[in-house]
Amino acid sequence: MEDILHSINWAVVAPLIIIQVILVIVALIDWTKAKNTNGPKWLWFIIIIFLNIIGPILYFLFGRRQQ
Amino acid sequence: MMKVLFKKEVLENWRNKKWIWVPLVFILLAIMDPITNYYLPDILESVGGLEGGAVIELPTFSPADAIMMSVSQYSTLGVLVIVLLSMGIISGERKSGVIELVLVKPVSYTKFVLAKWLSLLLLVFAAFIIGMMASWYYTNILYGEITFSMLLAVIFYYGLWLLFVCTVSIFFNTVTQSPGIVAFATIGTTAGISLVTSLLGIRLAWSPTNLSVYIQELLVTGDVSSELMYTTIISIVLIALILLASIYRFNRTFIRRSQ
C-alpha cells in the first residue's frame, strides 16, 4: 500500500478528490438551508456524508423539495 | 417575452444549485475512467495477492480509447443524470400547479416550451463541454495527443446525441404530469432505439444511437465518414420533429383547458 501512495502523481488525482469535496460542501450548505426535504432530514445528512460521490447527487436529485 | 422566460429558468437552475453540481458531476464522469485505467496496473500490483506469479495482461489504451471512455460514461450515467434532472422540468410544475401561475399571464405556450428546452440545453451543454475539456486535458497528459479540432468534432457529434435525449425528455414532459413516467419513458425510448438499432444492424445504419460508433471511427481514421454525415442529418431532423411535437402537444393541452 505504501508503494502505491508514492507512485501516484497527486497533481493528477487531486482534482477528483477536490470535486468530491466541493459536491459534499455544496450539498451540506443547501441541506442546512432547506426547511424540509423529501423524507427525513437527518437521513439526507447521512446519505450526503457517507455515500461517496453519489450521496450529494442523490440529495440534489431527490432530496430537495421545490418551493 | 422569450428572453424573460429563459432568464427565469436559468436563474431557477442557479437557485437549485444545478449550475454547480451538474458541471462537477460531468467532470467527474469524464475523468474517472481515464485516471482509473491509467493507474490500474499500480492498483492491481499493490493489492497483489495473486499467487504463483499469475500475470494479468492489461490492454494498453490509445488516446482515442481514453476519450471514448469519457463518451461511454456519458452514454450511460451521463444520460441517466440528464434524464433525472429534466424529468420534472415541465411535468413537475404541472403536478404542483406552479405552471398555472405562469400561464395565467399572456405567455405564448410555444415560447414557454422553447424556454424550458433552451435552458436545459444551456445547462447540459455547458457541463458536457467542460467535462470533455477535462477529459481532453487528462488524455493529453496520460495517454498521448488528441488534437483540439478532433475534440471539437467529438463534442459536436456526441452533443447531438445528448441534444436528442434532452429533446425526448422535454417531449415526455409535455405528455404526462408525472416526473417518474417522464424519466421511465425517456430511458425506455433511448434504450428501445438502441436495441432496435442493434437488432436491425445495417438497415438502421443512420440511427442516432450509432453516433458514438461513428465517432470512434472518426477518432481512429481522422476523417468524417458518409455514415456519420447521414446520421447527423437524420438526428437533426428527428430532434426538430420531436421538438415540434412537444410544442404541438403542449399547446393542445393548455388551449383546450382554457376554453
Image (tube, coloured by chain):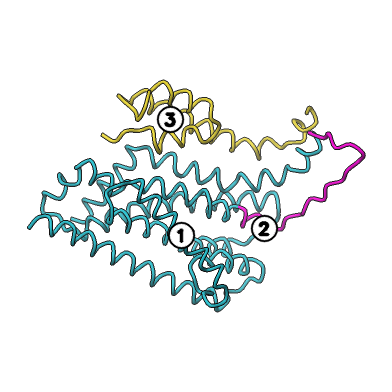
Chain colours: A yellow, B cyan
Q: Which of A13 and A48 is in front in this view?
A: A48
Q: Distance between the residues labelled 3 and 2?
A: 33 Å
Query: Callout 3: few (<14), some (14-19), or many (20+) C-alpha neighbours within 10 Å?
Result: many
Name the spot of residue B180 as percent of width and height, x first.
Answer: 36, 46
Q: In this view, does B90 lie above or below B239?
A: above
Report if the CB atoms under discs 3 and 2 are less than 8 Å apart.
no
Tell me, for residue B65, which label it has, or none.
Answer: 2
What segment carries the magenta color?
B47-69
Q: Distance between the residues labelled 1 and 2?
A: 24 Å
Residue at x 40%, y 51% (from the top left corner)? B184
Q: Nearer the viewer, residue B49 or B148?
A: B49
Q: Which chain carries label 2?
A: B
Q: Which residue is denoted by mark 3 in the rendering?
A: A27
Q: State yes or no: residue B116 in magenta.
A: no
Q: State yes or no: residue B52 in magenta.
A: yes
Q: Which residue is denoted by mark 1 in the rendering?
A: B190
